[in-house]
Structures are given as structure tokens and as C-alpha cells.
Amino acid sequence: MRRGVRTSTVFLAAVVGAVGVARGERPRMTLADRVFVNARVWTGDAARPEAQALAVRGSTLLAVGSNAEARALAGRGTEVVDLGGRRVVPGFIDAHVHLLGGGLALGSLRLDDVETSDALLARVRAWAQAHPDAHWVTGEGWSYAAFAGGLPSAAQLDAIVPDRPAWLVSYDGHTGWANSFALRVAEVTRETKDPPGGAVVRDARGVPTGVLKEAAQDLVERLVPKPPPHEKEQALARAIAQASAWGLTGVHEAGMGEQDLALLASALEQKPSLRVYAALPIARDPSPDVLARQDALRRQYARGRLRVGAIKGYVDGVVEARTAAMFEPYPGDGTGIPSWTQAELDRAVAAYDRAGWQVMLHAIGDRGIDMALTAFERAAAANGTSGRRHRVEHVEVPRTADLARFAAGGIVASTQATFPYPNANHLGVYVPTLGPERARRALAFRSIDDAGAVQAFGSDWPVFSADVLRAIACAVTRSTLAGTPPGGWEPAQKLSVEAALRHYTADAAYAEHAEAEKGTLAPGRLADFVVLSQDLLAVPPEKLQDVQVLRTVAGGQDTYRARGF
Ligand SMILES: [Zn+2]
């Protein structure tokens, strides 16, 4: 209900603003601050899907229409921008990022683009040599496919970093790789027990190999020096600038520590080019005190560039580490590691649902997804609530029959457009780990759409890049940038460009309860849009990867301009 009220308020503001009636005067036209003409605007708005021009006043759109309509709103002080026939789309909204992690990643040892263990170790060696004063060698981004058997070993790292601890986290953040020095300082030995929700990988003799899965990563992670606040601030500023360059005007922060929220709020004040919808970490058994503290943060960040509205939890792990919870075993053995019993999960979700929160649950395996959906359904039934728009994050390997539960329960499928990127890791590790039957129903974006669910796209940056245009190319072609495999991976799940755009705009806005303000281009909505180098909706699929962001406008202001444009 609250949504409806807000919608009409925004609409009313637009109408009153446009007419501008002052007491005792004739109604006069409110003029635009900026008009953008000669564009091909894909508005996402069913009432007017295509337009030529946009008129902006303050942070919102005054008009969306023809060149003549927009020019009629231009006065002497109005800036007129001729876009030369370029394609314009609503500002992109990434429904799942880790901004701080993304910003830190931009300035650290990254191993994402390295495909072989030799190349990977060479990069670690170079970094260690260039940073002789670093007490720890830390980095992120290695892929399972780089190693025979899918996992590295401490011995490989010992050969290049023998003299200080080294700790390298996999690209998905679910598996850590330590050298022997790090295992020693963390006191991880043959006697160390697997912590709940985690596993210490051991060799045939029971000796830890250096690989720690899921919660077991904390054994080493807790010792890694944390970046001080000023480094975090710089990282957030870098993340915000990079987001604008990718055409993002909004992101959903998928779980930020309470102590980092203030840093983010101040970063957004200094660089007001992004709107962030943030989730707080779930408490396992939320006490009245915890709920009150989280509610205070929700009220503190209720409007403005940082808005807190969701709670984020993890139901399971990931496929490659065999920690995503499955109904059937992985090849070899094991069905994954759920982080909760169903009863515990039901209790926590119901408490947050009752308190009016939207809950976002990371769930990847079919069993994990079923657990998340079940918890949402039971919470709504127990509390008599509706319209919370609870979200399953990732939805990688759902049972086909479970897809209908999204639309039925008003549950959002929050998926990542680049997860089906069919590189060596995907085809060589991800797919075989699932086995053929599960691989066929994995990352099934088309089936999710066909089941009538609202599907919001995101990146999980820094797990994957948050480059939206590359991600759209992946969702449309299901191929690598090199065009492999021919015809794409599981081609029946390819999306149209329009569907992918919608998932990155209107659907992502819906997933944060903000479709009345953004995600489409219509009068009264935020003036958030992107100017593209080529017409995304007309180029052949194999050329999608060449389309560039030329200009990003957020809240009426330029937040990114490509060089020379
Ligand atoms: Zn994530």
C-alpha cells in the first residue's frame, strides 16, 4: 500500500512542477535545466516505449517525448545536448554487488583473467616481489579450472612465497588457498576439526592441503590485516567511479557490515553519482535488540543516496566447491553444505518478514533454493504478509517445478547475467561438477522468465565484473567474447536484448521497491540514463560486445563521459 501512495506523490509533483502555478499568476511553464534531443530513447515505459528526447529539471525528468516537445521546455538558461541519433536507455541498476569488495579489488592482486596455474603463480610471485614490505600476500580471483583436480595446494604457494603468510581467495569467494606459513600462524593442523558450515581439505594422510572451504576460511581470514578506514573510503570512491563508467546509476549492495555503512554514506555524499540500496547481514536468531538496532539503521538510511531496506543471508555455498546444497549427490560424493536447518531458517526469515524487511537469501543448489522458497512461503503464511518481494540470490540450479513458486509467492529471482559465461572454468569445472541433468537446468534465465517471475540482473561484483554491456552480451549469446562455444552454451536459455535490459533496469528497480522512481524513463522519474555508442537493440548479437557507454547521467548530472564524447 505504501508503494501506491508514493507513486501518486511522485506523479503529482511532476504535474505541479510542470504547470508551476503561483498565486495570482497565470500558470506558466517550468523550464528544463537540460534537454537531450535527437536520441533514440528506449524508455522501458509501456505507455511510451520509444521517444526522441528527454527534458530534465533538477534530478528528475520533466518530459519524455519528441524533439519539439523537449525543445519547447528549453529557455535561455537551458543546456541543449544533441545526441546525434544515439541510443539512450534507462540507467542500469545492478541488483547484486559488493561495492567495498569491488573497490578493494580494483587496487589489489587479482587473478581473475589467468587461466593456468603457471601463469597464476607467476603473477603471485611478481606481486610478492613488488611488495616486499607487505606482511601478508593476499589476492583474489583464482578459478578452479586452473588446477588439476580443481583445487590448488599449499606446496605450490610455498615454492614462491615461503617467508610470510599467503592467502588467496577463489573468484567466487567460497574457497581460500593458504601457504604453509599461513596454515602455521592459523594453527591449522591435522587435528583441526571442520567448523560448522565449512571444510578443511585434507590429503590421504589427513594433512590439510592448504585449501579451506566456506566457513573454514575464517580460520585464516580472521588473521589477515583488515584495510583501515581511509583505504576503505578510497576503495568505495573507486568503486563508485567505476560503476558510473559501466553505465550504472544504481546498485544493490548485497550485505554490508553495519560499521561500513557510514563510510559508504559519506562516500556517496562526496561522489553523488550512484544510488545504493543496501542489505544488512542476517542474524541467525534475531533478538528484539538486534531487530531494534537494524530497524534504527533502516530509519537512519530511509531516503537519500543510501537506502537500507533488506536483510541478506546465505543458505548454501557454490557449485565448484561442492558446497551448494543439492538433492542429489555431486559426482563422487556429498550433497553440499546448507548453512541452516529448515526450522532455523524459517524462524529467522519469519522474524524479519514480520518486522517488514525484504529478505535476500543466497541459494544456489536445488535444495538450497527449495529451502529459501519454503522459508519465504512459510513466513508469509504465518505472518499473513504479502508484497515483501523477498529474493533468492543466484538461483543457479533450481528444480524446474520450483520456478512457478517465484511468481506465486511474489518472490524475486535475483540472477547474475555473466554467471553462464562459458569459459574454461565454466565448461571444465562448473558443468562437470553439476553433471548433465543439472547442467541443463542451471542458470536458466529464459525458463525463469517463462515461469512469470520477476528476474533482476546483477553481477556479484567483484566475483564477476559489473560491466553491464558485457553481461547483456553474455545473457543474449551465452558465448564468450571469443564466440565460443559455437551457438552458445545451453542456447535455449538465451534472452532477447530487450529482456536483458528490462532485468537490468525496471526489474532491478522493482526488486528494491523503487519502480515508481526509477528503472524506466517517464515524467517524474529520476533522470537516470545512459547514452550508448551503438544501438544495442539493433546490432547483431555477436557485435553486442563492441557497444560502449558514452555518457552516464544520474539524477540529471553527468557522472561519466567517454573520452572524445
Ligand atoms: Zn554476492
Image (spheres, rainbow, N blue to C red):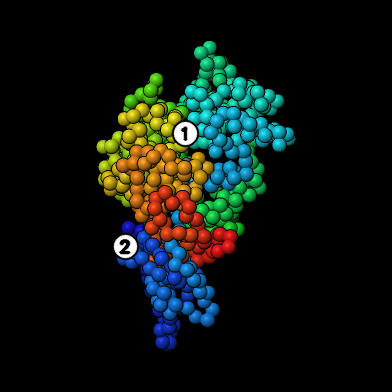
* Quarter holding residue 155: top right
Q: Is residue 68 visible?
A: yes
430 lies left or right of 562: left
Count residues near mark 1 (Cα–Cα under 10 Å), then give few for <14, some for 14-19, many for 20+.
some
Mark 2 residue type = Ala
Marks 1 and 2 sit apart, C-alpha to C-alpha, by 40 Å
Q: Along the polypeptide, which appears first: circle 1 or circle 2?
A: 2
Asked if disc 1 and disc 2 are in contact, CB closer than 8 Å, the reply is no
Q: Residue furthest top?
A: 205
Q: Give the percent coordinates (x, y) of residue 233.
A: 62, 49
Question: Is label 2's Cβ within 8 Å of ligand 1?
Answer: no
Q: Give the percent coordinates (x, y) of residue 260.
A: 57, 46
Asked which secondary structure carries label 1, the reply is: helix
Mark 1 residue type = Ala
Asked which secondary structure carries label 2, the reply is: loop
Mark number for residue 424? Answer: 1
The residue lying toward the viewer, choosing from 307 and 336, is 336
Count residues near mark 2 (Cα–Cα under 10 Å), then give few for <14, some for 14-19, many for 20+.
few
Name the residue: 55% across, 43% down: 101
Classify the position of the N terminus by image quarter: bottom left
Name the residue: 40% across, 84% down: 27
Q: Give the percent coordinates (x, y) of residue 351.
A: 38, 41
* Quarter holding residue 342: top left
Determine which residue is flagged by label 2: 46
Classify the position of the C terminus by image quarter: bottom right
